[in-house]
Image (cartoon, rainbow, N blue to C red):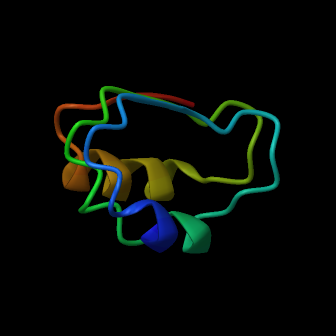
Amino acid sequence: MEHLSGLSNLEELHLSHTQITNDELKHPEGLTGLEALDLQHTQVTEEGVKKLQEALPNCEIIH
């Protein structure tokens, strides 16, 4: 997510049905405008979702 950190106006990100993992979702701090993140059918674990939710409290994460 580091390469997306400058996209503070990004509101939705759909990553469902990808091979994305917990490690690739580190550093979401710059995504301050993110309201919805779709992680259905990915390799992201519940622990990864928990960490993301802590970092992005105003974002609805679908897992």
Q: Tell me which residue sits at (44%, 48%) in the image.
A: 49
Compared across the picture, whether 22 is left or right of 33 comes to right
Quadrant holding the C terminus: top right
Question: 12 or 39, which lies in front?
Answer: 12
Identify the residue at horizontal 48%, vertical 58% (top origin): 48
Q: Which residue is drawn at 29% across and 45% down?
A: 53
Query: At which x and y percent is residue 57?
Result: 17, 39
Residue 34 is situated, as x and y percent measured from the top left of the image, at 31, 35
Q: In this view, does 17 lie to the left or right of 49?
A: right
Disc tally is 0
Q: In this view, does 26 lie to the left or right of 55?
A: right
Q: Nearer the viewer, residue 43 or 58?
A: 58
Q: Position of residue 1 (x, y in %)?
A: 49, 64
* Figure check: 4 above or below 41: below
Q: Is residue 11 placed above or below 52 in the rendered structure?
A: above
| Residue beneath the point at 29% across and 50% down | 31
